[in-house]
Amino acid sequence: MRTSLYILILLCSPNILFGQNSDSIYKNPEVAAQYFGGMDSILAYLDRNSVYPKISIKNCDEGTVIINCIVERNGRISVNHIVESISNELDAESRRLVENMPAWRPAIQKGQTVRSNVEISLEFNLASEKAKRKKLKK
């Protein structure tokens, strides 16, 4: 019973995912990490920089890739793992987009910048891609 209770408390801890030192990764810090400029800016970045892989267009691959990331104390973002996958090509493109993002505002806990966990959803839609290509040709 003691072991089960300990595991339950560990799994339900809302704030710290890993460890309790300067390398701790916070899931729900007091102030969450934010992309500079907010949602509009992140969408603009993704729109400007995304490249729909030709093989994915040929295979009619579309959907949402969800990536679990860590925003470091200096604001850089790194991919932890792919939570939801579509195809190897779209997963690789999602990873490339996230790893090349400009720095974020890091999370804050007790007045200090901390590492934090975020999930980013990247939607790949063939109709949107075709409209984007058509617009570029004009």
Image: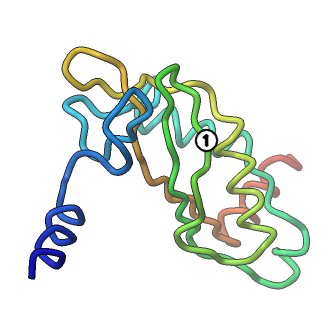
Under tag 1, what secondary structure? strand
Using the image as rendered, state which of residue 1 and residue 128 is in the foreground.
1
Image coords of residue 75 (percent x, y): 51, 24
**Left or right of 133 on screen, residue 112:** left
**Left or right of 15 on screen, residue 117:** right
Image coords of residue 62 (percent x, y): 66, 76
Displayed quadrant of residue 106: top left
**Considering only vertical position in the picture, is 75 above or below 15?**
above
**Left or right of 68 on screen, residue 93:** right
Image coords of residue 92 (percent x, y): 77, 60
**Considering only vertical position in the picture, is 124 above or below 136?**
below
The residue drawn where x is 76% and y is 65% is 130
The residue drawn where x is 16% and y is 71% is 8
Q: Residue farthest to the front?
A: 2
Image coords of residue 95 (percent x, y): 70, 53
Using the image as rendered, state which of residue 89 and residue 138 is in the foreground.
89
